[in-house]
């Protein structure tokens, strides 16, 4: 039998694809300050600042005197005084653009001035504060996120489920308020477009006022965990990872036991201060109970916390900022670090009889827990506890942030200026690709065989429409499996491939298959995307016996559903009498942002 290659080019009907090359609405022309962006927040922060007078706008930006006068007049209200009840601060770029004599040139000048004078940092802070203020607000319901923002219904559902905790009720003890935009970005179906939509809505509705900066969240980590043999060989070391002394009373510690999803036992962390880089050791008991605790563990203990440290190999440990100093994790208390996943009990006592020493300072507060940033020793090796109570040294060759084009994780991230994009939404993998989020010239231009894209770009959609639009090269990728898979007689094989590092939705899809089967007309091939949608590739047709070829086929894989995740190729043998193998298969996908 001779193996044959069949190249299958899946050109599926597009669903509600945006028309390439459409102009943005309103008076603005490219380069445009997009709604919900850091640039929008920076411009709004500048024009809404009390120090931004007509003179500043007219002479320093500079704007046309009529634009400067109209901006201040609109902002300050009828009494002409900023800071009074009739003020009307600007809430969006569109709001700004509605002022007479303000157009694209004026907005470009305002952005240039804001960028040159440090307002982008203030804008980023305001944008993040607005997003967090919105998603953590009791009035932000699923209906608000789904219908008014609006988000994809799955993103809205996942945000509310994360925030409200296991009981699904906001304002109870198991709530998990978002402590950062990075934590929000880890929620399935939340990505750049969702964050932009949240920012636009939040800024327009007055969330995240940062005129009075909130108190800084303490920087503290769980730097060592001891879960050794016996009932009392339990210890947790806490490190001040910040640059200023910490009041220990501002910290709380709790144990999440068994199937609980919120704190089962809580305690305030000590009294006094903890110097930068210093450690504080909590233990169940420092007093002798039969043969434990081990003497060196007892010597290192700074604070006995009793049952709050009575943990086993499947319990989770939580360090939080105790803002009201009541010793309990409340709705307004940010999580600082979690050993494990509060919402999920491990399937076994995976941490039993071991000692864990942190060697990567990146905190973990939510989602799947990984031990990549910890060194592990067994119970008896750890009984000397020679480093318990000693400030940690982050020397475990922690992963280095990725360069452009390299694999990345959200925990480690990428080099400055790059973003970790395309981590699968379905949990099939934790890798993305480091990409440059700034589009090169030519991205978005229309393209066809007679007018190709610039170097480093591809023409997306050409298999759908004959022409398309240019996208960065990182939005395309080939993913292959060389594993030989048996095709059982009158049975099916369905191997998977994890696609990652792309944008959000697929455009062009190419499948290449190598089969070894004596009677290929017995076979049906179906492509299944990560969302469960299917596209038939071949169904017992004679052409599968023919020479290698490419072809296009209609199907039902949507062009507005998630591309990153596990794809499957289902190979069914529908007639008895012969068996064969799938030798290898691959996917080539060109993606875009939804």
Image (tube, rainbow, N blue to C red):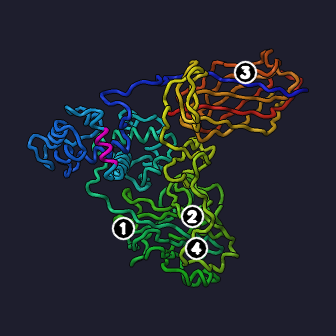
Which tag, 1 or 2, sits closer to the chain's start? 1
Q: Which residue is mark 2?
A: 360
Q: Nearer the viewer, mark 2 or mark 4?
A: 2
Disc 2 versus disc 4: distance between alpha carbons? 22 Å
Could you tell me if residue 12 is visible in this image?
no
Disc 1 versus disc 2: distance between alpha carbons? 30 Å
Q: Position of residue 349 (x, y in %)?
A: 65, 61
Which of the labelled discs sits on residue 435, or is there none? none
Q: Which residue is mark 1?
A: 326
* Quarter of the rendering containing residue 451: top right
User: Residue 426 or 22: which is nearer the viewer?
Assistant: 22
Which tag, 2 or 3, sits closer to the chain's start? 2
Question: Residue placed at 58% from the left, 77% from the top?
Answer: 388
Instruction: Find numbered disc 1 in the image and state the secondary structure of the residue it sits on.
Output: loop
Q: Position of residue 431 (x, y in %)?
A: 61, 47
Q: Nearer the viewer, mark 3 or mark 1?
A: 3
Q: Which residue is mark 4?
A: 234
Disc 3 versus disc 4: distance between alpha carbons? 63 Å
Which tag, 3 or 4, sits closer to the chain's start? 4
Q: Which residue is mark 3?
A: 550
In magenta, the rendered stretch is 108-115
Residue 589 located within the stretch drawn in magenta: no
Instruction: Find numbered disc 3 in the image and state the secondary structure of the residue it sits on.
Output: strand
Disc 2 versus disc 3: distance between alpha carbons? 48 Å
């Amino acid at each position: 039998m001779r193996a044959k290659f069949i190249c299958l080019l899946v050109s599926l009907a597009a669903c509600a694809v945006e028309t390439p090359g459409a102009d943005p609405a309103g008076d603005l022309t490219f380069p445009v300050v997009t709604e919900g962006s850091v640039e929008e927040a920076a411009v709004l922060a500048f024009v809404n600042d009390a120090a931004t007078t007509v003179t500043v706008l007219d002479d320093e930006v500079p704007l046309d005197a009529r634009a400067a006068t109209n901006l201040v007049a609109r902002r300050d209200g009828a009494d002409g005084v900023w800071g009074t009840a009739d003020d009307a601060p600007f809430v969006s770029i569109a709001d700004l653009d509605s002022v007479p004599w303000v157009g694209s040139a004026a907005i470009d000048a305002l952005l240039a001035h804001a960028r040159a004078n440090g307002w982008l940092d203030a804008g980023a802070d305001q944008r993040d504060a607005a997003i967090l203020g919105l998603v953590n607000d009791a009035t932000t319901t699923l209906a608000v996120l789904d219908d008014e923002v609006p988000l994809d219904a799955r993103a809205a559902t996942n945000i509310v489920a994360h925030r409200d905790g296991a009981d699904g009720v906001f304002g109870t003890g198991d709530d998990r308020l978002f402590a950062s935009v990075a934590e929000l970005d880890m929620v399935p179906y939340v990505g750049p477009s969702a964050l932009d939509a949240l920012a636009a809505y939040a800024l327009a509705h007055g969330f995240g006022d940062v005129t009075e900066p909130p108190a800084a969240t303490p920087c503290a980590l769980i730097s060592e965990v001891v879960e050794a043999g016996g009932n009392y060989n339990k210890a947790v070391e806490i490190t001040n990872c910040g640059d200023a002394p910490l009041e220990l009373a501002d910290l709380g510690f709790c144990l999440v036991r068994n199937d609980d999803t919120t704190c089962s036992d809580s305690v305030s962390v000590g009294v006094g201060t903890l110097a930068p880089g210093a450690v504080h050791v909590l233990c169940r008991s420092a007093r002798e109970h039969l043969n434990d605790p081990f003497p060196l563990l007892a010597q290192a203990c700074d604070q006995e916390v009793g049952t709050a440290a009575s943990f086993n190999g499947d319990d989770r440990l939580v360090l939080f900022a105790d803002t009201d100093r009541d010793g309990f994790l409340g709705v307004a208390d940010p999580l600082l670090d979690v050993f494990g996943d509060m919402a999920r009990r491990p399937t076994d006592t995976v941490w039993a009889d071991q000692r864990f020493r942190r060697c990567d300072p990146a905190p973990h507060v939510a989602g799947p827990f990984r031990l990549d940033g910890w060194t592990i020793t067994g119970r008896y090796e750890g009984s000397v506890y020679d480093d318990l109570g000693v400030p940690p040294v982050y020397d475990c060759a922690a992963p280095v942030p990725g360069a452009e084009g390299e694999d990345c994780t959200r925990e480690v991230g990428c080099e400055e200026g790059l973003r970790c994009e395309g981590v699968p939404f379905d949990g099939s993998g934790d890798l993305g690709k480091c990409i440059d989020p700034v589009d090169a010239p030519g991205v978005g231009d229309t393209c066809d065989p007679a007018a190709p894209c610039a170097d480093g770009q591809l023409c997306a959609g050409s298999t759908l429409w004959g022409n398309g639009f240019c996208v960065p090269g990182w939005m395309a990728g080939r993913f292959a499996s060389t594993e030989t898979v048996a095709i059982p007689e009158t049975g099916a094989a369905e191997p998977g491939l994890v696609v990652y590092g792309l944008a959000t939705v697929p455009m062009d899809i190419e499948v290449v298959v190598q089969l070894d089967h004596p009677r290929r007309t017995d076979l049906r091939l179906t492509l299944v995307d990560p969302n469960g949608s299917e596209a038939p590739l071949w169904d017992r047709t004679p052409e599968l016996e023919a020479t290698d070829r490419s072809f296009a086929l209609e199907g039902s894989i949507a062009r507005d559903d998630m591309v990153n995740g596990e794809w499957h190729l289902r190979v069914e043998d529908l007639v008895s009498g012969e068996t064969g193998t799938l030798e290898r298969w691959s996917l080539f996908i060109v993606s875009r942002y939804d």
